[in-house]
Image: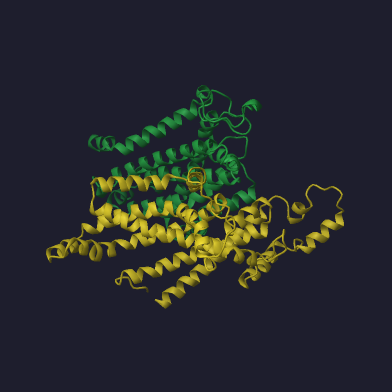
Amino acid sequence: MWQYALRRLIAMAATLLGVSVVVFVMMRLIPGTVVEQLLGQSALVSEETVLSLRQFFGLDRPWHVQFVDWLGGVVRGDLGESWRSDRPVLELILARLPVSAELAIGAVAWSLLLGVPLGTVAAIGRGTAYDGSIRFTATLGLSIPAFWQGTLLILLFSLYLSWMPPLDWVPITEDLRGNLAIMALPILTLGTATAAVITRMTRSSMLEVLRQDYIRTARAKGADEPRVAGRHGLRNALIPVVTVAGVQMGYILGGIVVVEDVFNLPGVGRLLLDAIFQRDYPVVQGTILVGAALFMLLNLVVDLLYGAIDPRIRYR
Amino acid sequence: MTARADDLRSNRLFVAGAVIAGAFVAAGVLAPLVAPYSPIAVDAARMFEPPSADHLFGTDRFGRDLFSRVLFGIRVSLGIAGLSIGVATLIGGAAGLVAGYFGRGLDQLLGRLMDLLFAFPSLLLALGISAVLGAGATTTTVAIAVVYTPFFFRVMRAAVLAEKNLAYVEAAAAAGAGPGRIIARYLLPNVLAPMLVQVVVGLSYAILIESALSYLGVGVQPPTPSWGTILNEGKEFLLISPWISLFPGLFIMLSVLAFNFVSDGLRDHLDPRLRGA
């Protein structure tokens, strides 16, 4: 398994190199350069100032030299510096990471806790009213945009229940209650679509498994229904569910931006959005690169999880 | 064939989805006739009015009629979704067809390229593209098309791989049909069904991405009314005029729900293993 993990890591490094080329090229496609962006339309700037600024940002060198230089920094953990605050991009990201990480982990956790049992119940009671209402609710959960769901929750709690979350974010380690008061609604919102996807996937995967011969054998042996469904059914049905959970990481990482905006949370998503509005391109570039790297890493972890769930899977 | 068509018509959710989706398209096409006001007409005397008989969905901070804005928003939101998914289907589908049919180096090259795009969380990629090209309807369309091209590439490639070694394709090749004829006459008709399901799925996601980008302020720009843009404008006034934020969101959810019902129905219908599930 370690050999497999290592090989996947190497393949991932190759993709990541390609991704960094894409990100680098994208940022070079922006009309004008840093210099023009910073100076704006000012006509009073002399030719020399422009030249020296271009030199300062290293823009007078050929682009492949710039790329190698930038990539060299990235490999050493140097994502460049923000144009607005002059602080290292990595430092800015790390400072806001706890908020986003809690949001993502919480969302995945609650979507699994809700989705797997609901999907199982729907599959076992296939065709019943339970099944129907679970399927309908799941499709509804898939269709409600996160920013609108968040908006509705804010309205419900502030206008009708007269409850407002505290304004300042506190780490979970410092004040559990205060932290949860702020994070509960955002986590709920971010996890809704994923919970819906996991419910649907668990149901269809479970239906597939329940048709297999070994389920009939288990029943024939006299195993009771909970044992058939849990030990023989669910365990085998979970593989596709885990795959879907991995793919959903992409949704979660993007959804963070939306949910942090709705609930005004000081996370990495907010950092990216502010950077886009302020044309702080090193921050945009760094955040998107880190997001893609995380996405790939999470998918690798998910692939390695298969082995833990299904002992038949051996990595080669 | 008639039996299968009957199946689909007896699927109540599919029918409901198709009817809602059809109603949306019709309302969007007829918006200039149906809408009581211009979507951008300002009326300083009637700002922030709650829903009433005059203004079904109320008015916004410029006194603009929200019902008319939401109706015209159908054109923008569904238009961008349809156009971007159309482009992604054409480019991704063509690339997937070629990669799946010819295989080898071409497949490797196209596959790696698509993998690169797939490595990004989709909304982050769309945000990056908006940052580069500048916010606006065209950028939003391009961003969604780029994000979904690899998706259709994979669907098409997998469908072609599943079909191309079947006896009927080999028979056609043995009978002297060239690659062009095999693709157009035999492969395409047989891979269209799985593509169709994914196109409808793609439409629902495209509506969600467009509205998310516009809600965040990096998509369609005011005064053009897209559902996300109206929600963006309602953000500041949420607690004093919640109706601004209610109706466009409801329309987004209903349209996405409709497309989800349609794609679920089509999938069950086309996949015999799921029939009656």
Residue A18 can be seen in this image: no
Quarter of the image that includes the N terminus of chain A: bottom left
Above/below status of A126 relative to A79: above
Q: Which chain is green?
A: B
Image coordinates for residue B20, horizontal then vertical, percent: 39, 33
Res. A267 image quadrant: bottom right
Residue closer to the observer: B1 or B37: B37
Judged from this view, the residue extending furthest toward the bottom is A2
Residue closer to the observer: A105 or B103: A105
* Number of disc labels: 0
The answer to whether residue A30 is left or right of residue B95 is right
Instruction: Name the colour scheme.
Output: by chain
Image coordinates for residue B243, horizontal then vertical, percent: 52, 35
Image coordinates for residue A61, horizontal then vertical, percent: 75, 63
Image coordinates for residue A42, horizontal then vertical, percent: 82, 48
Instruction: From the image, state the color of chain A.
Output: yellow
For the point 15% across and 62% down, which residue is it? A219
Quarter of the image that includes the C terminus of chain A: bottom left
Above/below status of A122 relative to B39: below
For the point 61% across and 65% down, which residue is it? A95
